[in-house]
């Protein structure tokens, strides 16, 4: 019984696939629907989904994260509202960290002499 059913299904599939090939749409972006002979349900072959658009809030957050990582003080890692200083190697530091660093350097220079 199962051999007869399998043979009938394979014959139906062969006749359906040959007739479907002749009637394929020319545009590949169209949805193609075929009927499954076993369950009589419609199987939909859809084109791949597109990427979701980034909302403006996400773009703003991403921009803020990038700016924060670029303009943050390399000592305290905060985004400073005070003036920002840059050393010859390109490191940025806020005014308070610069003053502390300068005071530490002066102390070390005085201790060595």
Image: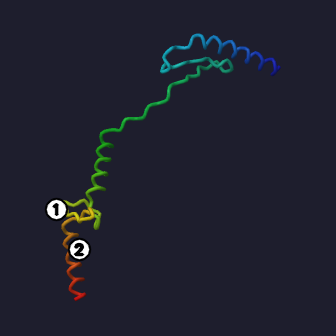
Between 71 and 12, which is closer to the camera in this rendering?
71
**Quadrant where the image shows the N terminus:** top right
Q: Which mark is on residue 101?
A: 2
**Residue occupying image coordinates x 33% and y 43%:** 58
Q: Residues within 10 Å of mark 2 (few under 14, many from 20)?
A: some
Q: Nearer the viewer, residue 110 or 65?
A: 110
The front one of 58 and 67 is 67
What colouring method underlies this structural image? rainbow
* Residue 29 position within the rendered picture, expressed as x and y whole percent measured from the top left: 48, 21
Left or right, 68 with reference to 48: left
| Residue at mark 1 | 83
Q: Residue 74, percent across and down?
A: 29, 64
Tell me the SS state at disc 1. Answer: loop
Q: Residue furthest bottom?
A: 113
- At x 23%, y 87%, the residue is 111
Image quarter where the C terminus lies is bottom left
Is label 2 in a helix, a strand or a loop? helix
């Amino acid at each position: 019984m199962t051999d007869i059913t399998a043979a009938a299904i394979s014959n139906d599939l062969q006749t359906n696939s040959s007739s479907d090939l002749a009637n394929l749409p020319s545009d590949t972006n169209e949805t193609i629907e075929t009927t499954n002979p076993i369950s009589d349900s419609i199987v939909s072959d859809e084109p791949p989904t597109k990427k979701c658009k980034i909302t403006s809030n996400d773009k703003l957050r991403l921009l803020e994260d990038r700016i924060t990582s670029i303009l943050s003080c390399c000592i305290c890692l905060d985004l400073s509202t005070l003036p920002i200083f840059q050393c010859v190697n390109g490191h940025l530091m806020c005014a308070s960290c610069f003053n502390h660093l300068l005071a530490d350097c002066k102390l070390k220079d005085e201790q060595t002499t």
